[in-house]
Amino acid sequence: MAKTNIPRKPIHTHEGAKAQHISPEQQLRRSVMACMLWEKEFYEDGQTIAERIAQTIPHVVPEKVSWIAIEARKQMKLRHAPLLITREMARIPSHKWYVADTLEQVIDRADELAEFVSIYWKDGKQPLSAQVKRGLPRPQAQPQAVQVQQRVPQVVRVPQVVRVPQVRVPQVRV
């Protein structure tokens, strides 16, 4: 005879205590809003947190993932977690359509362009996806990017990310 009322397998915290079952969206929100990426914390290191965030994103609706990234940047003032979320969204076919809008909202400072590309190329250098190119901030951030690059040495340079268009003014003869 088949059973339908089977208790769920208990889950445990990193310390070993019993934990409540929560939805993938709640797990993602909790992991993102309570972390400093790639920094060692009391219970687990930052690399494990980044892996957990990356594993949770495919299980959450794309709109919610985008809102979590924007909330993390705008309200919680986190810099790297929203960039990681946007990078992971670019990998997933169902999520990639939200990358351009999310990226435009998440990048506020000129040096974050280079930071995003370094996260994007962390697993190996590859071409930027079309959605990522569409989401790069508008040209008003480009002069700031050049100024920041002159002061801050980085592994990924801003000109690798943004191409500054050269405008030629036609000469008019009078």
Image (cartoon, helix red, strand yellow):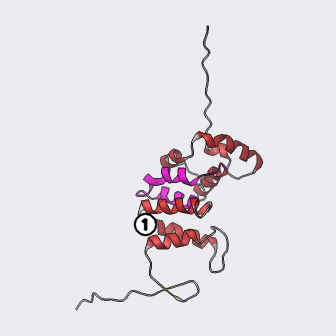
Residue 94, compared with residue 144, is above or below; it is below
Q: Which residue is drawn at 51% across and 60% down?
A: 88
The image quarter containing residue 162 is: top right
Furthest toward the top, the residue is 174
Residue 16, compared with residue 40, is above or below; it is below
Furthest toward the front, the residue is 75
Can you see residue 12? yes
Image quarter of the N terminus: bottom left
Q: Give yes or no for residue 19 being in the magenta stretch.
A: no
* Image location (x, y in percent) of residue 140: 61, 40
Say left or right for 26 vs 141.
left
Furthest toward the bottom, the residue is 1
Which residue in the structure is indicated by mark 1? 60
Q: Which residue is drawn at 54% across and 48% down?
A: 128
Q: Is mark 1 on a helix, strand or loop?
A: loop
Label 1 Cα neighbours within 10 Å, binned few <14 / some 14-19 / many ≥20: some
* Image location (x, y in percent) of residue 90: 49, 55
- Report the span colored magenta: 82-110
In-front residue for pair 9/109: 109
